[in-house]
Image (cartoon, rainbow, N blue to C red):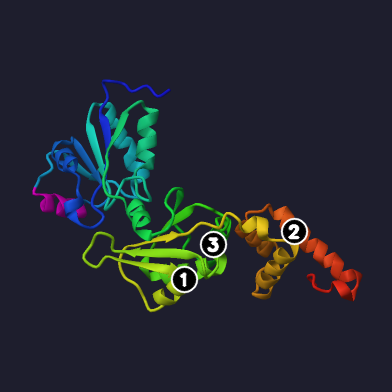
Amino acid sequence: MDVVTETTGTLVLAGTPIGDVADAPPRLATELETADVVAAEDTRRLRRLTQALGIHTTGRVVSYFEGNESARTPELVEALTGGARVLLVTDAGMPSVSDPGYRLVAAAVEQGIKVTAVPGPSAVLTALALSGLPVDRFCFEGFLPRKGGERLGKLREVAGERRTMVFFEAPHRLDDTLAAMAEVFGADRRAAVCRELTKTYEEVKRGPLGELAAWAASGVRGEITVVVEGAADSGAEELDAGELVRRVQVREEAGERRKEAIAAVAAAAGLPKRDVFDAVVAAKNAARTGPSEGKGLS
């Protein structure tokens, strides 16, 4: 059980607007004005936010971003153990969600320091709500790897995921990411691309991944959140051995190594890799026994 020491300070994680400054929760202004220390991902953006809210910070303002997160965490923990109220804000949304914050929270918890939050706007939840896709169960995958091969590998890992998936992506990589998703998940898998949420040019583009990939090929601007429908529940039960083998063949003909093709087919079908491997081996053996069984892998 975590024991909070009463003599220590408090770490406050505060959500900030993802677009429209009017979405800022009322408590945010109070915390910004009264915190002993404000740790901000970008101090210039913090200054613009406080100006828009018509307030001033009275505490010490320090930067806290990916590049200095490890080095600055001990300093902030020291302030907390000394009784300070430390407010952590990022450029947009909630700290720790694909933004700095996790290290500081973990360190504060370890020291028995109270951690609380000012709930605020969330691109993840906003995109889910607007997507038109099932939201009763979902998972957040954050940013995919930048390199094409690593990105495909990650998508294959989650191809069998049955919950709705939420991804963040940079606009200049969106077309490649959607094309990769269409390749791994299937061009007909439903998705939604949410752009510039709560801002002037907000746009939600819904449709099959194949169509969205073609749409994004001409270039898309702004902050991007992608919501993708989960794999169908009944897909694994309806695939017989012959269909599994056929899908492996299709991937091999497209240039994938057999091991990778088997892994991708298994993930998409929600089956153990061993089941698909056994089906491929059986088909290969059958192809060697006679021409009548020539539909197996060569």
- Say what amino acid the circle numbered 3 marks: Glu
The outermost residue toward the bottom is 218
Q: CA distance from mark 2 to mark 3?
A: 23 Å
What residue is shown at x 27% (from left), y 53% (from top)? 92
Mark 1 or mark 3: name the one nearer the start of the chain.
3
Question: The residue tagged with tag 2: helix, strand or loop?
Answer: helix
Q: Quadrant of residue 73?
A: top left
What percent of the width, then of the height, locates residue 183?
55, 69
Question: The residue tagged with tag 1: helix, strand or loop?
Answer: helix
Do the numbered discs 2 and 3 sit on residues whose CB atoms are within 8 Å?
no
In the image, the segment drawn in magenta is 44-54
- Check residue 95 for magenta coloring: no
Q: Quadrant of residue 236?
A: bottom right
What percent of the width, then of the height, locates residue 287?
85, 70
In the rendered image, the quadrant that contains the N terminus is top left
Q: Which residue is mark 1?
A: 176
- Say what amino acid the circle numbered 1 marks: Asp
